[in-house]
Amino acid sequence: MLRIELDIFSGRPNPSWILSPKEEKELVDRVKADPSLMLPVTAATGGLGYRGYIVTTEKEGDESLGKAALPSRFRLGGEPLNKDAATALWLLDTSEKPDTEVDDFLRGVATDTIVRQPARPERPGQEGVEKGSLAACASNYFTSSTNFSFWNGSSYISNNNCYNFAANHRTNTFAQPGRISGHLYSSLTCSSVSTAAQWDGWFNGCQSADNLTIALVTWPGVDFHFYRKCASGIWCHKPGSTAARNYDNSGNIITNVETCNRGGYTSFCGYWYANNSLIMVQ
Amino acid sequence: MSWDSVTRAEVELEVFSGRPNPAWSLSGAETSRLVELLSGLPSGEVRELPEPLGYRGFAVTLTHADARVTAVRVYKGEVRVEAGGAVTALADPGRTLERWLSTTGTQLDPGLREMVLNELQND
């Protein structure tokens, strides 16, 4: 029997849960495929907050673990050796059991840490940007705020949506956050769509070159929408299969996404950044 | 414009930005009714219809027996018709056609259906 402990608290005891037989087999398969996932329990894998998992074989002589000759107690996941984010996220999913001690908040904290990219050096004069806040970036890739012919031609207009436009990537696939990275959003909430976008490669702060700045909003529980900053301080967007444009639902040029008329997309989720040459969507 | 020999009609609720729009096919009887309604509409003013973020009416694709396609957009009392490269317009007084189209979307999520009904309350 395998017990998984989510190593996350400082004062309180960590939450833990028992894997089902099927989950146990899955975990054994994963660590057998990549034994380097297993770390000593004492490995330094983070400070305050999420530090990975501790896997313990509980008495009852688990046969599968014995046969695999795995340590009876080992650590998995956590920084800076956040090797296999997919396994870490899968293990987090196994905590969703009746009477689980892992609530949505904890799950969010763990997910954020697992999904987060390695820390980049801060730009001079740019103290840690508060997550989701708007930063003035030094090296931007701004497309025209008036000419949208690249998006509005008949061959492209119907099959490229707000996310294609935001990423400046015309794939004709009506792109969805998380699809290209294999982590499609699971609900129409700021949290879920933001996580999916991070998986696709969007960051919390300015990129050093060709920076794209986008804003995410949601129609809570129903849909998502993105805006992208284009030339002259104007924000542009492409609502679904309709034409890309620089105005809001009142017909006003958009200079501030947070205050413009967004119709039913009332929830403002924050800003994200990526290098235009590197970001891709699907 | 010609509504003869329409063999198929697909309706798309124009509403989303990120997710694909809900879409469905009309039954044979509904297709006949649609053609009847379209045939009875007075002519209108040809112009670009607004396409706001959120609800923006219905887009109907009609396929004819000879494989011609007619694209119809219905929103706020106006109907824009594109066929063979030509654009014409009809009027939809009282948004009757638009209301009828909303009733054909039987698989729509109840919340979405309610939103559409709210939108249709304004003439």
Image (cartoon, coloured by chain):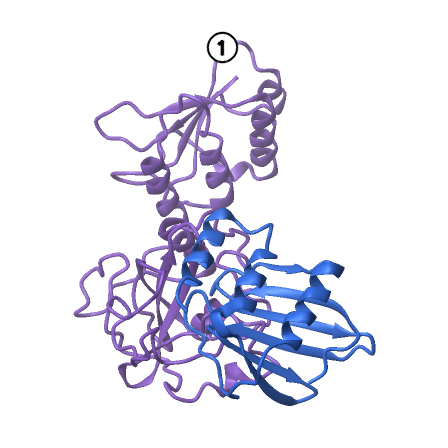
Chain colours: A purple, B blue
Secondary structure type for disc 1 = loop
Q: Which part of the image, by quadrant, shows the C terminus of chain A?
A: bottom right
Residue at (74%, 73%) from the top-left corner? B63
Question: In the figure, residue B23 lies in which quadrant?
Answer: bottom right
Chain letter of mark 1 equals: A
Q: Position of residue A88 (x, y in %)?
A: 46, 39
Instruction: Please indicate, yes or no, whether residue B21 appears anywhere in the rendered image.
Output: no
Residue at (41%, 69%) from the top-left corner? B123
Residue at (77%, 77%) from the top-left corner? B4
Q: Could you classify mark 1 by the number of other residues whose Cα lies within 10 Å: few (under 14), some (14-19), or many (20 or more)?
A: few
The kind of residue tagged 1 is: Lys
Q: Residue furthest right?
A: B66
Q: Position of residue A49 (x, y in %)?
A: 28, 38
Q: Residue furthest top?
A: A60
Left or right, A247 with respect to A126, comes to: right
Instruction: Please indicate, yes or no, whether residue A16 appears anywhere in the rendered image.
Output: yes
In the foreground, A140 or B4: B4
Q: Work out whether A80 lies above or below A234.
A: above
Residue on which disc 1 sits: A59
Left or right, A120 with respect to A71, comes to: left
Left or right, A68 with respect to A81, comes to: right
Q: Work out whether B73 lies above or below A132.
A: below
Residue at (36%, 47%) from the top-left corner? A112
Q: Position of residue A11 (x, y in %)?
A: 21, 27
Q: Position of residue A192 (x, y in %)?
A: 41, 49
In the foreground, A120 or A267: A267
In the foreground, A249 or A155: A249
